[in-house]
Amino acid sequence: MRLPSGAARPVAMLRAVFPDEPHPYVAASTNSLGTLLAEIGRTDEAEALLRESVDLHRTVFAAGHPNIGYPLTALGRVHLSEGRFAAAEPLLREAYDARAGGLPARHWHIAASGLELGRALDGLGRLDMAQTLLEESHSILLETFGPDDERTARALDALSEHRTRRGMPDRAAELHDRAGELRDGAIGAR
């Protein structure tokens, strides 16, 4: 795995501090770095680091702990970005189930995993189940963050893609345009 020296340094330092046992800080750091690599398009490196993070999280946390949702969702997103819906689905289902079982109802982390699981199901053609998850996730994110948040825009994009698959191009275009307005506003606000 090729990592930029500056980005690899924090994980290497944590591994040096905790050489004999997996530690939550190392698990979280590998997840953060893997997520960053995925966001800049270095998906092969991201996937390797996120797989390591999943293994670390499974070692550090009890089975079904909601924290396993972080690397599972991030790894699932990598698979989604490459159109590998079948590979993403079990990871995202495990993330969703762990979060739904360990967090309060309507917690935004449940919605984040539900949104990605909905995208995977949508890509697999399981449109009814996808629609339910996508709409519920959008509702929670809208309720939690409001109509002008990037996470709400991401949910609108997923619903737009879903509407396109369902043969509803007018409604899809409306959602896509609203998501674009939100992203443009969020980028301008930074």
Image (tube, grey):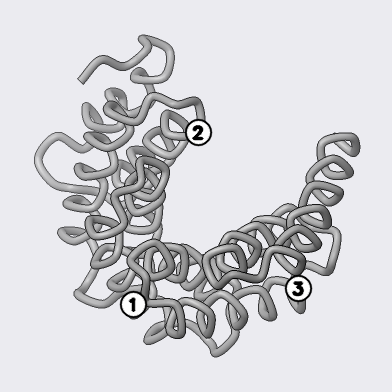
101 left or right of 53 in image: right
Neighbour tally class for label 1: few under 14, some 14-19, many 20 plus, Cα within 10 Å: many
Identify which residue is drawn at 60% across, 63% down. 164
Q: Quadrant of the C terminus?
A: top right
Residue at the disc numbered 1 = 98
* Secondary structure type for disc 3: helix
- SS of the residue at dot 2? helix
Residue neighbourhood size for the residue with mark 2, other residues' Cα within 10 Å, grouped as few (<14), some (14–19), many (≥20):
some
**Which part of the image, by quadrant, shows the N terminus?**
top left
Q: Nearer the viewer, residue 110 or 58?
A: 110
Say which label, 1 or 3, has the lower sequence index: 1
The picture quadrant where one finds residue 12 is: top left
Residue that numbered label 3 is attached to: 142
Q: Which mark is residue 39?
A: 2
Marks 1, 3: nearer the viewer: 3
Instruction: Identify the residue at horizontal 38%, vertical 39% (top origin).
Output: 29
* Foreground residue among 2 and 41: 41
Q: Position of residue 179 (x, y in %)?
A: 77, 54
Residue drawn at (58%, 60%), measured in percent from left and top? 161
Sequence-first disc among 2 and 1: 2
Report the mark closest to the observer, 2 or 1.
Answer: 2
Q: Amino acid at mark 2?
A: Glu
